[in-house]
Amino acid sequence: MNGEEIKRQIADRIRKANSILAITHARSDGDGLGCLAALQTLANQAGKTVQLLLPDSLPERYAFLFPADRPACGADFARLVASSDLIVIVDTCTFNQLDGLESVLRANRDKIVVIDHHTTTDDISLVQWSDPTAAAAGIMMTELLETLGYLSGGTQAEHIRISPSVLRQGAHALAVAITSDTGWLRFSNTDVRCLAVMGRLVGLGVQMDKLYAQLFQCDRPQRLKLLARAIDSMELHCAGRLAVMEIRKADFAATGARPDETESIINEPLRIATVDAVILLVEQDDSIRVSLRSRETLDVAAIARQFGGGGHARAAGVRVKDEIGVAKGRLIEAIEKSL
Ligand SMILES: [Mn+2]
């Protein structure tokens, strides 16, 4: 079956369902969460009950997507499944990203449909729409909701009327999904299909300035102070190709920033033309959390594995028990050998 046929099959299953349970992967991101929010908002207006579930917890920065009710987290999974006609899994197709849910999912295989754009796929259901050419699951979700008529104000045949404000809210959530996975339409996956979908969402009322502010201009001053200290700590090695930053417990104490506010600080040194790899060391009570990034050449997952960690070629991480200065020296040495 081709993608178009599977998409129609999923649309059909959604049409026939009265109660839907939508799930995205653990350590959820803007793509998965934006898809869940859009599906819930729009299918609700079409008269369906849509419950949402995350394997772990909701990142605070995406709480704005769920102004009424936050998704359930982990607990109560079996009960939610029992009360749903259909389970929609979004932005993953592997059991190991659905922490703790595998056995219940296996027992309810016939109820499941999957919408995903990753290359690794487990056999979760008979109805799996996987399209690695889609830049974001949000693109597939937009196309699915269009097939259902939910993004055109509803379908006459089903007597569905979706109000303009709900349409705008759904489109906004889908735009969060797509701009998250494309790095605000900057990454190489930003293709014609992606921009065409974004164009249609803007046509439905998405305001790019509001979206940008919500995603990237909602920091607390404490985080900016922490960023300043991290940048101040930056050292350059390997003829400017490697940037190393550290954040110590004293930096959190001095700025009042929270541990979760280190997110994306690691990307800042990539503003420098020569920098190809970045190490960020964050001191914690009993260990050092190390994050690694690279622009195009260095496989940082391989570096992380040398220290017992893992990740992707461009983004990886590891926890080490060394004192921060020792950890830094060992990592710089490992990267020097590879660069
Ligand atoms: Mn995604």
Image (tube, rainbow, N blue to C red):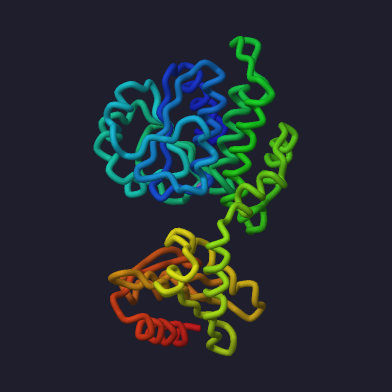
Decide which of 192, 149 is in the foreground and name it: 149
View extreme (bottom): residue: 239
Quadrant in the rendering for residue 311: bottom left
Q: Is residue 10 depicted above or below 208 in this figure?
A: above
Q: Is residue 185 left or right of residue 91?
A: right
Give me the residue at 25% from left, 31% from top: 107
> Is 211 located above or below residue 256 in the figure?
above
The residue depicted at 63 percent of the width and 54 percent of the height is: 217
In the image, residue 304 lies at what x, y percent? 38, 72
Query: In this image, 324 relative to 202: left or right?
Result: left
Q: Give the number of marks.
A: 0
Residue found at x 32% / y 81%:
323
Q: Is residue 127 left or right of residue 37?
A: left
Measured as percent of width and height from the top left, residue 75 is found at 29, 36
Residue at image coords 47%, 63%: 257
Of the pair 191 and 57, the residue shown nearer to us: 57
Classify residue 146 by image quadrant: top right
| Image x and y of residue 37, in percent | 52, 34
Give the vertical position of 227 relative to 70 (above or below): below
The one of 288 and 149 positioned closer to us in this rendering: 288
Give x and y (percent) for residue 282.
41, 71
